Image (cartoon, rainbow, N blue to C red):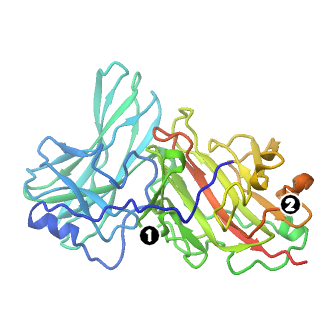
Amino acid sequence: MRSWNRRATATCAAAAAFAVGAATAAVAAGTMAARTGTVIGTCANPVLERDVTGWGRHNTGAAGSRVAVGAHVVADHAYVQPAANGANPEMYLPQKDVAAGEQWRFAMDTWVSGSTATVQARMQVDWYNAAGGYLGHVNGAESPVPVTAAEQWTRVAGDFTAPTGATRANVTARLAGPAGLTWAATACDYRPAGEGGQNPPTTPPPTTPVGDTAAARFNWGTPLPASDDFDYGSAASPAVPDRTKWELAGDGVGQCMSGHNGNGRRCDANSRVLGGFLRMTGEADGDTGWLGSTLSQKYGRWEVRARSQATGANNGRQYHPVLITWPESNEWPEGAEYDYLENSAPGEQCAGAFLHYPNHQPRTQEHAEKCGVDLTQWHNFGFEWTRQHLKGYIDGVEWFSFSRDCVQCAPGPMFQTIQLDNFFGGSMQPAVFEVDFARVYAVTG
């Protein structure tokens, strides 16, 4: 139904760093070879891509600013409070809407530089009700943070339970240390507490039984080299998707491209490989992921093992995981568009497909729907485009087949995209779209 032009991209990463004294300039020039930090999830404005919205000084913390950093695994910017900090400085982070009884893990990555050796940091929460009434303050556990001249990121997290009447969490952090420290933070990440520090769980998906793939059942042959089983990277050191196989959002690491019809943005940092699977993250502020295969072909077969899940409270503004073949020419609707899977990220029980006719003639599209499929669980989604038909498979079983009025007659080559679509803009229900493998096969004859 909806797709993206991979050529018409815009770089959203800012280039300038702000000088906040000599110590802060060192932050901007961080040259640590090994990238550290955590792949973030769903907090609003987690990597300060555009501005410092949601971040600021608190209590004895000095006024900070948005600074470029060079050694975080996904973030290009951090919120930095300079050496003018007083003793035990604090900062505030983006707020979070909550409901009473919900258990949340609030976390961020931090780096401290200065004259002492080690300090302690903790997450904190002030709870408020719908009328703005204050309900109380809770401190998280203290975490040791090394003080280093070179850029080094440490995870700080705390688990919290929203009290009766709570509708908002004002999230803050406190650094227990002497005055004069420079304090940087980025990659804020808010997740249900039971999902652990790397959010959601980072265990690789189970091995796919051969019998429930269309490729095995119908003898599609050997996957082409553009296929990806995502068996690189790790939870501790997530990897950029293989650039010989994938084009990134914005066509580069650390970049973004404008959203479809102004809805959200697609950012490279929202698609990472964690050793066995790809995780595509849709954030509350509307930033999301996208990948486009570097291989285009006229006719072909594709099979993707995937699952999707929402990770925050359901507010009705839901991400849509989509698997698409899109025309290499980027001519739409002339080049057709075959969305062979689309669903809502809360894991609704119905898979949809939208097969667009070239030029939307003699009609716009064919539509298929298969219900009773738990899309929060792993399934294999296969798609076949031949001269004769378009066919879709779930776990090796055909669920649609179209050939009338030449719906399959796309005029030129097409390539696979993996998308977590945002149709609404901001204030989204956070979600993830995870892919175990994305395999491509040739059609001959």
The residue under the point 35% across, 34% down is 169
Residue 307 vs residue 77, the one in the foreground: 77
The x and y percentages for residue 200 are 53, 53
Is 432 situated above or below 284?
below
The residue under the point 78% across, 72% down is 298
Residue 257 vs residue 77, the one in the foreground: 257
Mark 1 highlights which residue?
Answer: 253
Residue 263 visible in the shown view: no
The x and y percentages for residue 438 are 69, 67
Mark 2 highlights which residue?
Answer: 396
Crowding around mark 2 (Cα neighbors within 10 Å: few <14, some 14 to 19, many 20+) is: many
Quadrant location of the C terminus? bottom right
Q: Nearer the viewer, mark 2 or mark 1?
A: 1
Where disc 2 sits, the SS reads loop
Task: Count how many numbered circles sit on residues in the image.
Answer: 2
**Mark 2 or mark 1, which has the lower sequence index?**
1
Residue 144 visible in the shown view: yes
The residue under the point 32% across, 79% down is 33
Where disc 1 sits, the SS reads loop
| Residue 8 in the figure: left or right of residue 19 | right
The residue under the point 12% across, 66% down is 23
The x and y percentages for residue 326 are 68, 61
